[in-house]
Amino acid sequence: MNDNVIECKNLTHYYGKKLVYENLNINVKRGSILGLLGKNGAGKTTTINILNGFLQPRSGECLIFGENSQHLTPITKGRIGFLIEGHVQYAFMDIHQIEKFYSRFYKKWNNEPYWDLMSKLKVTPTQKLSTMSCGQRSQVALGLILAQDPDLLILDDFSMGLDPGYRRLFIDYLREYAKSNNKTIFTTSHIISDMERLIDDVLIMDYNRVLAQCPVKQFMDTFNQFTFELDNPNIDISKEKFVVNIDKIKNKIELNTFETEAFVKNFLLKENISVKNFKKVNLNLEDAFIGLTGKY
Amino acid sequence: MWKSIIYKEWLKVRWYLIAATLLLGIFVSYMFINVQHTIAFMQANNYWNVIVFRKEQYFHLIKYLPLLIGIGIAIAQYVPEIIQKRIKLSFHLPNNENKIILTMMGFGNLSLLACFSIVFLIFVGLSNYFFPYEIVNEAIVTILPWFIGGLAGYSLVSLIVLEPIWKYKMFYMVVAALFIPIYYESGVSGAFEPINFKLTIIALLISVSLLFSAYRFRKGEM
Protein backbone atom coordinates (compact mmCIF):
# COMPACT_ATOMS: atom_id res chain seq x y z
CA MET A 1 0.00 0.00 0.00
CA ASN A 2 1.33 3.43 -0.96
CA ASP A 3 2.03 5.32 2.25
CA ASN A 4 2.30 8.73 0.59
CA VAL A 5 -0.72 10.97 0.99
CA ILE A 6 0.76 13.56 -1.38
CA GLU A 7 2.99 12.73 -4.35
CA CYS A 8 4.06 15.48 -6.73
CA LYS A 9 6.04 14.28 -9.71
CA ASN A 10 8.20 16.48 -11.94
CA LEU A 11 6.10 19.55 -11.25
CA THR A 12 7.00 22.46 -13.50
CA HIS A 13 5.24 25.79 -13.55
CA TYR A 14 5.69 29.15 -15.17
CA TYR A 15 3.83 32.46 -14.83
CA GLY A 16 4.07 33.66 -18.40
CA LYS A 17 7.74 33.23 -19.19
CA LYS A 18 8.85 33.38 -15.55
CA LEU A 19 9.86 29.98 -14.25
CA VAL A 20 8.51 29.25 -10.77
CA TYR A 21 10.08 25.83 -10.49
CA GLU A 22 11.10 22.89 -12.62
CA ASN A 23 10.78 19.15 -11.95
CA LEU A 24 9.75 19.57 -8.34
CA ASN A 25 9.12 16.29 -6.53
CA ILE A 26 7.34 16.18 -3.20
CA ASN A 27 6.27 13.20 -1.10
CA VAL A 28 4.33 13.55 2.12
CA LYS A 29 3.90 10.41 4.21
CA ARG A 30 0.71 9.57 6.08
CA GLY A 31 0.77 11.01 9.60
CA SER A 32 3.64 13.42 8.97
CA ILE A 33 3.68 17.22 9.09
CA LEU A 34 5.60 18.83 6.25
CA GLY A 35 6.49 22.51 6.25
CA LEU A 36 7.11 24.21 2.93
CA LEU A 37 9.44 27.13 3.54
CA GLY A 38 10.60 29.74 1.13
CA LYS A 39 10.98 33.46 0.64
CA ASN A 40 8.17 35.53 -0.78
CA GLY A 41 7.62 34.57 -4.41
CA ALA A 42 9.44 31.24 -4.14
CA GLY A 43 6.30 29.34 -5.15
CA LYS A 44 4.69 28.28 -1.85
CA THR A 45 1.14 29.42 -2.64
CA THR A 46 1.57 28.23 -6.23
CA THR A 47 2.24 24.74 -4.90
CA ILE A 48 -0.76 24.91 -2.55
CA ASN A 49 -2.98 26.01 -5.44
CA ILE A 50 -1.76 23.14 -7.62
CA LEU A 51 -2.36 20.70 -4.77
CA ASN A 52 -5.96 21.87 -4.46
CA GLY A 53 -6.59 21.87 -8.20
CA PHE A 54 -6.86 25.68 -8.33
CA LEU A 55 -3.95 25.95 -10.72
CA GLN A 56 -2.91 23.77 -13.63
CA PRO A 57 0.85 23.12 -13.66
CA ARG A 58 2.69 23.52 -16.99
CA SER A 59 3.77 19.88 -16.65
CA GLY A 60 3.95 17.13 -14.06
CA GLU A 61 1.22 16.09 -11.67
CA CYS A 62 0.27 15.92 -8.04
CA LEU A 63 -1.53 12.93 -6.62
CA ILE A 64 -3.51 13.25 -3.40
CA PHE A 65 -4.71 9.96 -1.96
CA GLY A 66 -3.77 8.57 -5.39
CA GLU A 67 -6.01 10.99 -7.33
CA ASN A 68 -4.76 13.65 -9.70
CA SER A 69 -5.20 16.98 -7.88
CA GLN A 70 -6.69 18.52 -11.03
CA HIS A 71 -9.63 16.13 -10.92
CA LEU A 72 -10.34 15.42 -7.28
CA THR A 73 -13.56 13.57 -6.62
CA PRO A 74 -15.99 14.96 -4.03
CA ILE A 75 -15.10 12.07 -1.68
CA THR A 76 -11.40 12.96 -1.78
CA LYS A 77 -12.14 16.68 -1.39
CA GLY A 78 -14.07 15.73 1.73
CA ARG A 79 -10.89 14.19 3.14
CA ILE A 80 -8.90 17.42 2.71
CA GLY A 81 -9.12 20.39 5.05
CA PHE A 82 -7.98 23.53 3.28
CA LEU A 83 -6.95 26.78 4.94
CA ILE A 84 -6.66 29.61 2.42
CA GLU A 85 -3.96 32.23 2.99
CA GLY A 86 -5.30 34.93 5.31
CA HIS A 87 -7.82 32.56 6.97
CA VAL A 88 -10.35 33.41 4.29
CA GLN A 89 -13.88 32.38 5.18
CA TYR A 90 -17.41 33.59 4.48
CA ALA A 91 -17.20 36.93 6.25
CA PHE A 92 -20.93 37.60 5.97
CA MET A 93 -21.74 34.70 8.32
CA ASP A 94 -21.58 34.50 12.11
CA ILE A 95 -20.08 31.53 13.98
CA HIS A 96 -23.41 29.68 14.19
CA GLN A 97 -24.32 30.22 10.56
CA ILE A 98 -20.93 29.10 9.26
CA GLU A 99 -20.97 25.94 11.41
CA LYS A 100 -24.47 25.15 10.18
CA PHE A 101 -23.37 25.74 6.58
CA TYR A 102 -20.36 23.41 6.62
CA SER A 103 -21.77 20.69 8.88
CA ARG A 104 -24.09 19.35 6.19
CA PHE A 105 -21.23 18.66 3.77
CA TYR A 106 -19.07 16.36 5.88
CA LYS A 107 -20.10 12.91 7.07
CA LYS A 108 -17.60 12.87 9.93
CA TRP A 109 -18.51 16.38 11.12
CA ASN A 110 -17.71 16.76 14.81
CA ASN A 111 -18.49 20.22 16.14
CA GLU A 112 -16.83 19.66 19.53
CA PRO A 113 -13.38 21.09 18.67
CA TYR A 114 -15.08 23.98 16.85
CA TRP A 115 -17.17 25.06 19.84
CA ASP A 116 -14.23 24.39 22.13
CA LEU A 117 -12.21 26.95 20.18
CA MET A 118 -15.17 29.34 19.86
CA SER A 119 -15.59 29.35 23.64
CA LYS A 120 -12.11 30.88 23.85
CA LEU A 121 -13.10 33.77 21.59
CA LYS A 122 -14.72 36.85 23.00
CA VAL A 123 -17.29 37.18 20.22
CA THR A 124 -21.06 37.53 20.39
CA PRO A 125 -23.17 34.74 18.83
CA THR A 126 -24.45 37.02 16.06
CA GLN A 127 -21.15 38.78 15.33
CA LYS A 128 -20.21 38.53 11.66
CA LEU A 129 -16.76 37.20 10.79
CA SER A 130 -16.11 40.45 8.92
CA THR A 131 -16.11 42.35 12.23
CA MET A 132 -13.73 39.93 13.98
CA SER A 133 -10.00 40.41 14.42
CA CYS A 134 -7.59 38.43 12.26
CA GLY A 135 -6.77 36.21 15.25
CA GLN A 136 -10.41 35.45 15.94
CA ARG A 137 -11.04 34.64 12.28
CA SER A 138 -8.07 32.28 12.31
CA GLN A 139 -9.63 30.34 15.18
CA VAL A 140 -12.94 30.10 13.32
CA ALA A 141 -11.13 28.78 10.23
CA LEU A 142 -9.11 26.30 12.31
CA GLY A 143 -12.18 25.17 14.23
CA LEU A 144 -14.05 24.48 11.00
CA ILE A 145 -11.18 22.40 9.63
CA LEU A 146 -10.89 20.38 12.83
CA ALA A 147 -14.67 19.78 12.91
CA GLN A 148 -14.45 18.48 9.36
CA ASP A 149 -12.06 15.81 10.69
CA PRO A 150 -10.04 15.60 7.47
CA ASP A 151 -7.28 13.08 6.85
CA LEU A 152 -5.09 15.71 5.20
CA LEU A 153 -4.79 19.38 6.16
CA ILE A 154 -3.39 21.85 3.64
CA LEU A 155 -2.64 25.15 5.32
CA ASP A 156 -1.46 28.19 3.38
CA ASP A 157 0.48 30.59 5.61
CA PHE A 158 -1.57 29.96 8.74
CA SER A 159 0.45 32.46 10.79
CA MET A 160 -0.31 35.45 8.56
CA GLY A 161 -1.60 38.38 10.61
CA LEU A 162 -1.68 36.52 13.91
CA ASP A 163 -0.21 37.81 17.16
CA PRO A 164 2.14 35.47 19.08
CA GLY A 165 -0.60 34.22 21.41
CA TYR A 166 -2.94 33.17 18.62
CA ARG A 167 -0.05 31.62 16.68
CA ARG A 168 0.91 29.51 19.68
CA LEU A 169 -2.74 28.50 20.24
CA PHE A 170 -3.09 27.56 16.59
CA ILE A 171 0.10 25.49 16.53
CA ASP A 172 -0.51 23.69 19.82
CA TYR A 173 -4.05 22.74 18.82
CA LEU A 174 -2.93 21.64 15.39
CA ARG A 175 0.01 19.49 16.47
CA GLU A 176 -1.94 17.79 19.24
CA TYR A 177 -4.81 17.10 16.83
CA ALA A 178 -2.57 15.77 14.06
CA LYS A 179 -0.45 13.55 16.26
CA SER A 180 -3.27 12.06 18.30
CA ASN A 181 -5.36 11.29 15.20
CA ASN A 182 -2.60 10.31 12.73
CA LYS A 183 -3.45 13.20 10.41
CA THR A 184 -1.19 14.48 7.65
CA ILE A 185 -0.40 18.19 7.33
CA PHE A 186 1.12 20.14 4.45
CA THR A 187 1.71 23.70 5.53
CA THR A 188 3.49 26.90 4.62
CA SER A 189 4.35 29.79 6.89
CA HIS A 190 6.60 32.79 6.61
CA ILE A 191 7.27 32.71 10.35
CA ILE A 192 9.88 30.00 10.54
CA SER A 193 10.07 29.89 14.33
CA ASP A 194 6.44 28.67 14.36
CA MET A 195 7.32 25.82 12.07
CA GLU A 196 10.05 24.51 14.35
CA ARG A 197 7.37 23.74 16.95
CA LEU A 198 5.03 22.11 14.45
CA ILE A 199 6.65 20.23 11.59
CA ASP A 200 8.39 16.85 11.19
CA ASP A 201 9.76 17.36 7.67
CA VAL A 202 10.94 20.43 5.87
CA LEU A 203 11.00 21.43 2.21
CA ILE A 204 12.94 24.61 1.58
CA MET A 205 12.46 26.30 -1.77
CA ASP A 206 14.34 29.11 -3.38
CA TYR A 207 13.52 30.74 -6.67
CA ASN A 208 13.34 27.95 -9.28
CA ARG A 209 14.81 25.19 -7.09
CA VAL A 210 14.59 23.05 -3.98
CA LEU A 211 17.35 23.68 -1.44
CA ALA A 212 16.49 21.01 1.11
CA GLN A 213 13.92 18.29 1.59
CA CYS A 214 14.33 16.09 4.65
CA PRO A 215 13.24 15.59 8.26
CA VAL A 216 13.74 18.77 10.31
CA LYS A 217 16.04 16.95 12.71
CA GLN A 218 18.26 15.75 9.88
CA PHE A 219 18.36 19.27 8.44
CA MET A 220 19.26 20.81 11.79
CA ASP A 221 21.89 18.13 12.46
CA THR A 222 23.62 18.51 9.11
CA PHE A 223 23.32 22.21 8.36
CA ASN A 224 26.02 24.26 10.02
CA GLN A 225 27.08 27.84 10.35
CA PHE A 226 30.61 28.90 11.26
CA THR A 227 31.99 32.35 11.93
CA PHE A 228 35.65 33.34 11.79
CA GLU A 229 37.96 36.18 10.89
CA LEU A 230 40.36 35.92 7.98
CA ASP A 231 43.89 37.14 8.51
CA ASN A 232 43.99 38.01 4.84
CA PRO A 233 40.62 39.66 3.95
CA ASN A 234 41.30 39.29 0.21
CA ILE A 235 40.86 35.52 0.27
CA ASP A 236 37.66 34.38 -1.44
CA ILE A 237 36.22 30.96 -0.61
CA SER A 238 32.68 31.63 -1.86
CA LYS A 239 33.22 29.50 -4.98
CA GLU A 240 34.09 26.35 -3.02
CA LYS A 241 31.64 23.49 -3.57
CA PHE A 242 30.89 22.91 0.12
CA VAL A 243 29.88 26.57 0.65
CA VAL A 244 26.10 26.93 0.57
CA ASN A 245 26.04 30.58 1.50
CA ILE A 246 28.62 33.03 2.73
CA ASP A 247 28.44 36.51 4.22
CA LYS A 248 31.57 38.58 4.30
CA ILE A 249 31.98 41.94 6.01
CA LYS A 250 35.61 43.09 5.76
CA ASN A 251 37.48 40.07 7.18
CA LYS A 252 34.54 38.65 9.16
CA ILE A 253 33.02 35.56 7.59
CA GLU A 254 29.72 33.82 8.22
CA LEU A 255 29.89 30.48 6.43
CA ASN A 256 26.88 28.20 5.88
CA THR A 257 27.46 24.62 4.82
CA PHE A 258 26.25 21.04 5.07
CA GLU A 259 29.81 19.99 5.94
CA THR A 260 31.11 19.34 9.45
CA GLU A 261 33.35 21.52 11.60
CA ALA A 262 36.22 19.08 11.06
CA PHE A 263 35.80 19.28 7.28
CA VAL A 264 35.88 23.09 7.25
CA LYS A 265 38.84 23.30 9.59
CA ASN A 266 40.69 20.72 7.51
CA PHE A 267 39.93 22.70 4.34
CA LEU A 268 41.27 25.94 5.86
CA LEU A 269 44.39 24.12 7.01
CA LYS A 270 44.95 22.43 3.67
CA GLU A 271 44.55 25.72 1.78
CA ASN A 272 46.82 27.56 4.23
CA ILE A 273 44.08 30.01 5.11
CA SER A 274 44.79 31.35 8.55
CA VAL A 275 41.79 32.42 10.60
CA LYS A 276 41.02 33.39 14.18
CA ASN A 277 37.96 33.25 16.45
CA PHE A 278 36.58 30.19 14.61
CA LYS A 279 33.16 29.35 16.12
CA LYS A 280 30.31 27.00 15.39
CA VAL A 281 27.02 28.87 15.76
CA ASN A 282 24.05 27.29 17.53
CA LEU A 283 21.20 27.58 15.04
CA ASN A 284 17.48 27.46 15.35
CA LEU A 285 15.34 26.68 12.26
CA GLU A 286 14.97 30.33 11.35
CA ASP A 287 18.74 30.91 11.50
CA ALA A 288 19.31 27.81 9.39
CA PHE A 289 16.67 28.88 6.87
CA ILE A 290 18.27 32.31 6.47
CA GLY A 291 21.71 30.69 6.33
CA LEU A 292 20.51 28.46 3.52
CA THR A 293 18.48 30.93 1.49
CA GLY A 294 20.46 34.09 2.19
CA LYS A 295 19.39 37.29 3.86
CA TYR A 296 18.06 38.96 0.72
CA MET B 1 -25.98 19.61 0.75
CA TRP B 2 -27.89 21.74 -1.71
CA LYS B 3 -29.82 23.16 1.21
CA SER B 4 -26.50 24.45 2.55
CA ILE B 5 -25.61 26.20 -0.72
CA ILE B 6 -29.06 27.77 -0.84
CA TYR B 7 -28.69 28.78 2.82
CA LYS B 8 -25.38 30.55 2.02
CA GLU B 9 -26.85 32.33 -1.00
CA TRP B 10 -29.89 33.36 1.03
CA LEU B 11 -27.67 34.88 3.73
CA LYS B 12 -25.93 36.98 1.07
CA VAL B 13 -28.97 38.35 -0.72
CA ARG B 14 -31.85 38.19 1.79
CA TRP B 15 -31.92 41.87 2.89
CA TYR B 16 -31.29 43.08 -0.63
CA LEU B 17 -34.02 40.81 -2.02
CA ILE B 18 -36.57 41.91 0.58
CA ALA B 19 -35.68 45.58 0.03
CA ALA B 20 -35.86 45.17 -3.77
CA THR B 21 -39.28 43.48 -3.59
CA LEU B 22 -40.59 46.21 -1.29
CA LEU B 23 -39.16 48.92 -3.55
CA LEU B 24 -40.74 47.40 -6.63
CA GLY B 25 -44.00 47.01 -4.73
CA ILE B 26 -43.88 50.66 -3.66
CA PHE B 27 -43.29 51.78 -7.27
CA VAL B 28 -46.23 49.67 -8.51
CA SER B 29 -48.45 51.02 -5.73
CA TYR B 30 -47.43 54.59 -6.58
CA MET B 31 -48.15 53.87 -10.25
CA PHE B 32 -51.71 52.83 -9.44
CA ILE B 33 -52.27 55.79 -7.12
CA ASN B 34 -51.49 57.88 -10.21
CA VAL B 35 -53.90 55.76 -12.27
CA GLN B 36 -56.62 56.25 -9.66
CA HIS B 37 -55.94 59.98 -9.59
CA THR B 38 -56.09 60.23 -13.39
CA ILE B 39 -59.34 58.24 -13.55
CA ALA B 40 -60.88 60.49 -10.90
CA PHE B 41 -59.68 63.55 -12.85
CA MET B 42 -60.70 62.59 -16.43
CA GLN B 43 -63.18 59.70 -16.03
CA ALA B 44 -62.32 56.05 -16.71
CA ASN B 45 -63.63 55.87 -20.27
CA ASN B 46 -61.57 58.91 -21.34
CA TYR B 47 -58.43 57.50 -19.75
CA TRP B 48 -58.98 54.10 -21.41
CA ASN B 49 -59.41 55.95 -24.69
CA VAL B 50 -56.02 57.65 -24.23
CA ILE B 51 -54.38 54.31 -23.43
CA VAL B 52 -55.93 52.45 -26.37
CA PHE B 53 -55.64 55.08 -29.10
CA ARG B 54 -52.72 57.27 -28.00
CA LYS B 55 -50.80 54.24 -26.67
CA GLU B 56 -50.01 55.88 -23.35
CA GLN B 57 -48.30 53.48 -20.96
CA TYR B 58 -49.50 53.85 -17.39
CA PHE B 59 -46.77 51.46 -16.25
CA HIS B 60 -43.60 53.03 -17.75
CA LEU B 61 -42.39 54.03 -14.28
CA ILE B 62 -41.16 50.49 -13.52
CA LYS B 63 -39.44 49.95 -16.87
CA TYR B 64 -35.80 49.67 -15.71
CA LEU B 65 -36.43 48.55 -12.13
CA PRO B 66 -36.32 44.77 -12.86
CA LEU B 67 -32.98 45.28 -14.64
CA LEU B 68 -31.54 47.23 -11.70
CA ILE B 69 -32.78 44.59 -9.27
CA GLY B 70 -31.28 41.80 -11.42
CA ILE B 71 -27.92 43.58 -11.51
CA GLY B 72 -28.12 44.21 -7.77
CA ILE B 73 -28.78 40.54 -6.98
CA ALA B 74 -25.81 39.50 -9.15
CA ILE B 75 -23.55 41.93 -7.30
CA ALA B 76 -24.88 40.89 -3.87
CA GLN B 77 -24.40 37.22 -4.72
CA TYR B 78 -21.05 37.14 -6.53
CA VAL B 79 -18.96 40.07 -5.26
CA PRO B 80 -18.60 38.43 -1.81
CA GLU B 81 -17.36 35.32 -3.65
CA ILE B 82 -14.60 37.04 -5.55
CA ILE B 83 -13.36 39.12 -2.58
CA GLN B 84 -10.26 37.22 -1.40
CA LYS B 85 -11.24 34.57 -4.00
CA ARG B 86 -13.72 33.10 -1.50
CA ILE B 87 -15.32 31.06 -4.24
CA LYS B 88 -12.42 28.65 -3.74
CA LEU B 89 -14.15 27.66 -0.50
CA SER B 90 -17.21 26.57 -2.47
CA PHE B 91 -15.10 24.75 -5.07
CA HIS B 92 -13.34 22.86 -2.29
CA LEU B 93 -16.62 21.53 -0.87
CA PRO B 94 -17.13 17.79 -1.39
CA ASN B 95 -19.44 18.28 -4.36
CA ASN B 96 -19.18 18.64 -8.09
CA GLU B 97 -18.05 22.22 -8.82
CA ASN B 98 -20.40 22.71 -11.78
CA LYS B 99 -23.39 21.60 -9.73
CA ILE B 100 -22.43 24.10 -7.04
CA ILE B 101 -22.29 26.95 -9.56
CA LEU B 102 -25.57 25.89 -11.19
CA THR B 103 -27.22 25.77 -7.76
CA MET B 104 -25.99 29.28 -7.01
CA MET B 105 -27.21 30.48 -10.39
CA GLY B 106 -30.52 28.67 -9.98
CA PHE B 107 -31.02 30.26 -6.59
CA GLY B 108 -30.37 33.73 -8.02
CA ASN B 109 -32.82 33.18 -10.87
CA LEU B 110 -35.50 31.74 -8.56
CA SER B 111 -35.07 34.64 -6.10
CA LEU B 112 -35.57 37.10 -8.92
CA LEU B 113 -38.53 35.13 -10.22
CA ALA B 114 -40.09 35.16 -6.75
CA CYS B 115 -39.56 38.91 -6.41
CA PHE B 116 -40.84 39.62 -9.91
CA SER B 117 -43.81 37.23 -9.55
CA ILE B 118 -45.06 38.92 -6.39
CA VAL B 119 -44.88 42.35 -8.01
CA PHE B 120 -46.23 41.03 -11.31
CA LEU B 121 -49.27 39.53 -9.58
CA ILE B 122 -49.93 42.81 -7.74
CA PHE B 123 -49.59 44.62 -11.07
CA VAL B 124 -52.01 42.27 -12.88
CA GLY B 125 -54.49 42.33 -9.98
CA LEU B 126 -54.58 46.11 -9.76
CA SER B 127 -54.63 46.48 -13.56
CA ASN B 128 -57.67 44.18 -13.68
CA TYR B 129 -59.36 46.36 -11.09
CA PHE B 130 -58.90 49.56 -13.11
CA PHE B 131 -58.86 48.41 -16.74
CA PRO B 132 -60.64 46.03 -19.12
CA TYR B 133 -59.03 42.74 -20.22
CA GLU B 134 -57.66 44.07 -23.54
CA ILE B 135 -55.66 46.87 -21.87
CA VAL B 136 -54.37 44.54 -19.15
CA ASN B 137 -53.31 41.93 -21.71
CA GLU B 138 -51.35 44.49 -23.74
CA ALA B 139 -49.73 45.79 -20.57
CA ILE B 140 -48.60 42.28 -19.57
CA VAL B 141 -47.09 41.60 -23.00
CA THR B 142 -45.28 44.93 -22.84
CA ILE B 143 -43.80 44.63 -19.36
CA LEU B 144 -42.82 40.96 -19.70
CA PRO B 145 -39.58 41.69 -21.63
CA TRP B 146 -38.61 44.20 -18.93
CA PHE B 147 -38.77 41.46 -16.31
CA ILE B 148 -37.02 38.93 -18.58
CA GLY B 149 -34.40 41.64 -19.16
CA GLY B 150 -33.91 41.66 -15.39
CA LEU B 151 -33.07 37.94 -15.53
CA ALA B 152 -30.71 38.44 -18.50
CA GLY B 153 -29.06 41.38 -16.69
CA TYR B 154 -28.59 39.17 -13.63
CA SER B 155 -26.93 36.42 -15.71
CA LEU B 156 -24.63 38.77 -17.62
CA VAL B 157 -23.51 40.74 -14.58
CA SER B 158 -22.87 37.46 -12.71
CA LEU B 159 -20.70 36.41 -15.63
CA ILE B 160 -18.81 39.71 -15.61
CA VAL B 161 -18.25 39.65 -11.84
CA LEU B 162 -17.04 36.04 -11.69
CA GLU B 163 -14.85 36.14 -14.81
CA PRO B 164 -11.16 36.18 -13.78
CA ILE B 165 -9.70 37.17 -17.18
CA TRP B 166 -10.00 40.85 -18.06
CA LYS B 167 -10.25 40.39 -21.82
CA TYR B 168 -13.27 38.12 -21.32
CA LYS B 169 -14.70 40.52 -18.75
CA MET B 170 -14.51 43.34 -21.32
CA PHE B 171 -16.04 41.11 -23.99
CA TYR B 172 -18.98 40.23 -21.71
CA MET B 173 -19.47 43.93 -20.93
CA VAL B 174 -19.72 44.70 -24.64
CA VAL B 175 -22.15 41.79 -25.12
CA ALA B 176 -24.25 43.03 -22.19
CA ALA B 177 -24.25 46.60 -23.51
CA LEU B 178 -25.47 45.40 -26.92
CA PHE B 179 -27.81 42.69 -25.74
CA ILE B 180 -29.68 44.12 -22.73
CA PRO B 181 -31.18 47.10 -24.66
CA ILE B 182 -33.09 44.59 -26.85
CA TYR B 183 -35.35 43.92 -23.86
CA TYR B 184 -36.02 47.63 -23.45
CA GLU B 185 -36.62 48.71 -27.05
CA SER B 186 -39.27 51.41 -27.24
CA GLY B 187 -42.39 50.18 -28.93
CA VAL B 188 -46.10 50.39 -28.75
CA SER B 189 -47.80 48.26 -26.13
CA GLY B 190 -47.85 44.63 -27.15
CA ALA B 191 -45.18 44.99 -29.86
CA PHE B 192 -42.97 42.34 -28.24
CA GLU B 193 -45.55 39.58 -28.15
CA PRO B 194 -43.99 37.47 -30.97
CA ILE B 195 -40.50 37.29 -29.45
CA ASN B 196 -41.13 37.14 -25.70
CA PHE B 197 -40.62 33.38 -25.64
CA LYS B 198 -37.33 33.60 -27.56
CA LEU B 199 -36.08 36.36 -25.27
CA THR B 200 -36.79 34.11 -22.27
CA ILE B 201 -34.86 31.19 -23.80
CA ILE B 202 -31.87 33.44 -24.56
CA ALA B 203 -31.88 34.78 -20.98
CA LEU B 204 -31.82 31.22 -19.60
CA LEU B 205 -29.02 30.17 -21.97
CA ILE B 206 -26.88 33.08 -20.79
CA SER B 207 -27.20 31.71 -17.23
CA VAL B 208 -25.41 28.50 -18.15
CA SER B 209 -22.40 30.39 -19.56
CA LEU B 210 -21.41 31.16 -15.95
CA LEU B 211 -19.88 27.68 -15.89
CA PHE B 212 -17.11 28.85 -18.25
CA SER B 213 -16.12 31.77 -16.02
CA ALA B 214 -16.25 29.50 -12.99
CA TYR B 215 -14.00 26.96 -14.73
CA ARG B 216 -11.39 29.62 -15.56
CA PHE B 217 -11.52 30.84 -11.94
CA ARG B 218 -11.09 27.27 -10.69
CA LYS B 219 -8.07 26.62 -12.89
CA GLY B 220 -6.33 29.79 -11.78
CA GLU B 221 -6.35 31.43 -15.22
CA MET B 222 -5.41 35.10 -15.12
Image (cartoon, rainbow, N blue to C red):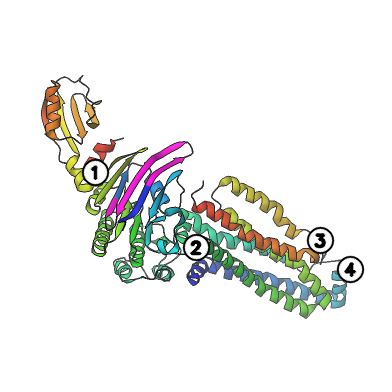
Residue A53 seen anywhere in this rendered image of the structure: no
The CA distance from mark 2 to mark 4 is 56 Å
Number of callouts = 4
Task: Tell me the mark number nearer the camera, choosing from 1 and 3.
Answer: 1
Q: Main secondary structure of the magenta part?
A: strand
Query: What amino acid is labelled 4 in the image?
Result: Phe
Is residue B63 rendered to the left or right of residue A62? right
SS label for mark 1 = helix
A33 falls in the magenta region: yes
Using the image, determine if residue B131 lies above or below residue B74.
below
Specify whether disc 4 shares its chain with disc 1: no
Residue B187's mark?
3
Few, some or many residues within 10 Å of mark 3 (<14, 14–19, 20+): few
Q: Where's residue A183, x and y in %?
A: 29, 61
The CA distance from mark 2 to mark 1 is 41 Å
Q: Where's residue A46, x and y in %?
A: 41, 46
Residues in magenta, as a range: A9-34
Query: What amino acid is labelled 2 in the image?
Result: Asn
